[in-house]
Amino acid sequence: MNNAWKPYKLGDVLRVKHGFAFKGEFFANSGKYIVLTPGNFYEKGGFKFTPGKEKYYSAEPPREYICSKGDLIVAMTEQSEGLLGSTAIVPRGGTFLHNQRIGLISHDADKADRLFLRYLFGTTMVRRQIRGGSSGTKVKHTSPERIYDVDVYLPPLPVQEQIGKLLALLDEKIEVNNRLNAHLEEVARLFFDYWFIQYNFPNVDGQPYEAANGELELNTFLGRDIPKGWEHGTADDLGTIVGGSTPSTKIKENFATHGTPWITPNDLSENAGNKFITRGNQGVTAAGIRDASLRIYPAGTVLLSSRAPIGYMAIAREPVTTNQGFKSFIPNKGYPREFVYYAVKNILKTVIQYSSGSTFSEISGTVLKSVEICLPPKDLAAKFAVEIEPIFNRQDFLEQENAQLEAARDWLLPMLMNGQVLFKSDPAAVV
């Protein structure tokens, strides 16, 4: 630790205010306010939202619990593993409410920098103390008083400001990439919808088929009109549908961090917002592959979680295998991965409706294979893939760039926070 860094208790430089116990009767599917919970935090800091699953509040809340842009908030309850003590900066004001499981942090501006504190909470030193001082057997909780008792070292305020700005620059670039990626995804989804749902793919004259009065025929299997030359089919026609399994966890030799990628639904949950995935949190060895009779699926396989929960998707960048929580599509029946990906997304509501299970919902391979779909000619699907490939390539690049930026941030964080990296007088320069 650099000599300029001084010991403090967090209570010396900040205060934490509990959120409000919002009444469930006022929760709604839409509205002016979104109620933040610990589930909206990433483990390493920042917000995440699952479209369609936000909790809105229909009543007018106490004004003091409406977050302002730039507010620093902290997860006081470990709703999911690793989230206790996670922090985030509120991105805009007048929209978000913090419930009782979230704390609003105020700080002494003469002693601490807000951005520096946001990253300080992400260090192992602080997270270990917060978790160690938490209570609860099944769900861990902390309190403002326990947070105040956490021991930290702080550099002079100008150094704090420089560290906070440097780390924030990395996060800002990551967020810019995420927004661009989301925009590209919307374009690609609308492209698929225009061609294969609205039937406005280009006809022989290059005109939108349906808009140019292209011929439609009643398909008795589907019970609706479809373009001439299209067919009734099932999800099984999109590719070979495959499952997975889990090697014995009692044999440690079955697993290796850098083994063959072995994907679980939790990996896809953590990968939410990305289209591609390279590997998950765990890999399997050759022994593990033999133990569970695992099959390795080729790059381009469209992964679909089939239980706990159903509906997470990603495209494998490299050969992978999965656990039993998947029914994935190997695109080997004449339809390219780009078409298969959106065709599967398009039937997700039906797939979820067909799911069953007493402990948790699951879709079986037999049922999934029987889900009816409308199949275009394969050459049209191939044309779609050619048109959409630049978007897929750009998204793949942005996702991998973000992975590199996150790795750089995570590598820098402990070095910056213990004074191993020293700032020169020029705020833009470090040594």
Image (tube, helix red, strand yellow):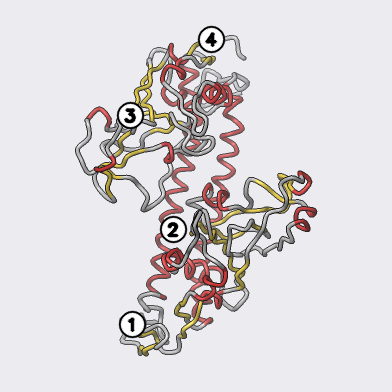
Which residue lies under the disc numbered 3? 19
Percent position (x, y) of residue 106?
36, 21
Extreme residue in the left direction: 60
Is disc 1 in contact with disc 2, using a CB cutoff of under 8 Å? Answer: no
Disc 1 marks a residue whose amino acid type is Glu
Q: Is residue 315 above or below residue 82?
A: below
How far is disc 3 from disc 2 in space, using C-alphas? 36 Å
**Disc 4, SS:** strand
Disc number at residue 184? 2
Q: Which of the two discs, 3 and 2, sits closer to the camera?
A: 3
**Sequence-first tag of 3 and 2:** 3
Percent position (x, y) of residue 41?
45, 38
**Sequence-first tag of 3 and 4:** 4
Percent position (x, y) of residue 95?
28, 39
* Local crowd size for mark 1, using a 10 Å CA cut-off: few (<14), some (14–19), many (≥20): some
Q: In this orientation, which residue lies closer to the viewer: 20 or 414?
A: 20
